[in-house]
Amino acid sequence: MDAQVIVAGAGPAGMMLAGELRLAGADVIVLEKLAARTGESRGLGFTARTMEIFDQRGLLSRFGEIEISNVGHFGGLPVDFGVLKGAHQAAKTIPQSATETVLEEWATQLGADIRRSHELLSVTDKEDCVEVEVRGPSGVHTLRADYLVGCDGGRSTVRKAAGFDFPGTAATMEMFLADVQGITLAPRMIGETLSGGMVMVGPLPGGTTRLIVCERGTPPQRRETPPSWQEVAAAWQRLTGDDISHAEPVWVSSFGDATRHATEYRRGRVFLAGDSAHIHLPAGGQGMNTSIQDSVNLGWKLAAVVRGRAPETLLDSYHAERHPVGKRLLMNTQAQGLLFLSGAEMQPLRDVLHELIRYPEVSKHFAAMVGGLDIRYELDGGAHPLLGLRLPHVPLEGPGQPASSTEALRPGRGVLLDLGDSAELRRRAAPWTDRVDLVTATVPGPTAGCLGNTSALLLRPDGHVAWAAPGSFADLPMALERWFGPGR
């Protein structure tokens, strides 16, 4: 074998997956057909859940000073994301190019083998391995691994070569995305709906301005090259009446409103993550963030299996957990597209939703949906309210113990939080201490409310609660074996 896992694509999903695999000790090769990063940044900023994930891996400090905001929207309707108490606020102005740089440096430091100018050509899923044909600087060659993950975007070669179905709807319109310099425009951070479409304006570092131009009635085009700046400026003038043609474009791109979703995220030894598994209108900045979260879900599971610590059946939980997330993502971005991009006939619905959003519970619902904080995985069942959810940041107190649940997750291992100082609990978990860290601590009074009478929690490496006492139907050893394999 050339590696335990091969990852196709060095975007945010591929780099996050490579880092997660290496953090757990798995060998990984990343194949990327581009010789260098483009510097373009379709994704911009992080949702609350991605901020949480990066914090759990100790990555936030690598981004330097982060501008955060609790101002969000759903389909252009303002939503106060600050109603989610105790959660991270979203990061607003971090370009995707910076995210890719940070994740690549992290994965490389952990030992990932990243091979640029290497294009994946074909995929053969064999009984005992997956084989890929690759064109690199020295010619065409073959690589073998236990598993292959396609993180190679909406036009994924892996998805096509491995025969995944990708049903959905084709684009009905073309929209423009551009980063420009040399102009000053009033910010339209959540977009402005106009008679002919929608425009969005966001300031970026270094005097750059992000523009999104959505003009209704523009048919989709199959472009071989990016649109010209003159096309973008002309569309802007038709919508707003303002001439911005004198601006200097940094880069220009186009996108559509196509919506497609792979029917399965796994076929044998081949997996899909990120845009290779789901494409949609980029409403609410969820695409890159969901892709990163796909990789966090899959990474620790793949590593556990290839290192012989967990049964191969653990990998089936990736599709079971993330496919519903992708389905819900497409649902909410389609809904936002209708609100954003429809004409005057949609205004009554906008007005009704605007009234509803004034209710705190409705705002919480939309904020959690867009922020990725409402995801609950179906686990073993039970009555505990946190079971299957991600555990929010919880401060911990105890000699020699991590200062918080966030810090406890930094090594990328499972964590058993013993909040009742139970010697019996620790005894029963002892056979799994090579994979699960035991943390005996208390929760300071002001923050203990979210845990109620909880005496213990089992956290998966992705931060989701796999078992809780009292409240889980499963016994602790059963839960440990399900998620971390047989004990020693």
Image (cartoon, helix red, strand yellow):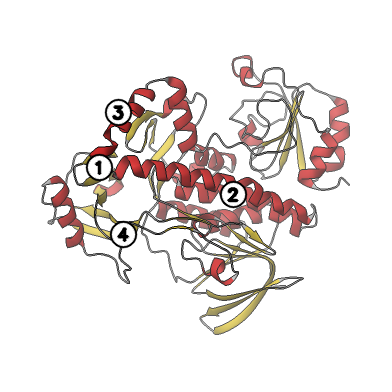
Amino acid type of the residue that numbered disc 4 sits on in the rendered structure: Ser
For marks 4 and 1, give the one nearer the viewer: 1
Amino acid type of the residue that numbered disc 2 sits on in the rendered structure: His
- Which circle's residue, 3 or 4, is located before the other in the chain? 4
Q: Are marks 2 and 1 in contact (CB under 8 Å)?
A: no
Q: Measure the alpha-carbon separation of dots 4 and 2.
A: 27 Å
SS under mark 4: strand
Q: Are marks 2 and 3 in contact (CB under 8 Å)?
A: no
Farthest residue to the top: give it.
Answer: 445
**Which quadrant of the structure image shows residue 7?**
bottom right
Foreground pick, 242 / 169: 169
Give residue 351's mark.
3
Give residue 254's mark.
4
- Residue named by callout 1: 343
For marks 2 and 1, give the one nearer the viewer: 1
Amino acid type of the residue that numbered disc 1 sits on in the rendered structure: Gly
- Which circle's residue, 4 or 2, is located before the other in the chain? 4
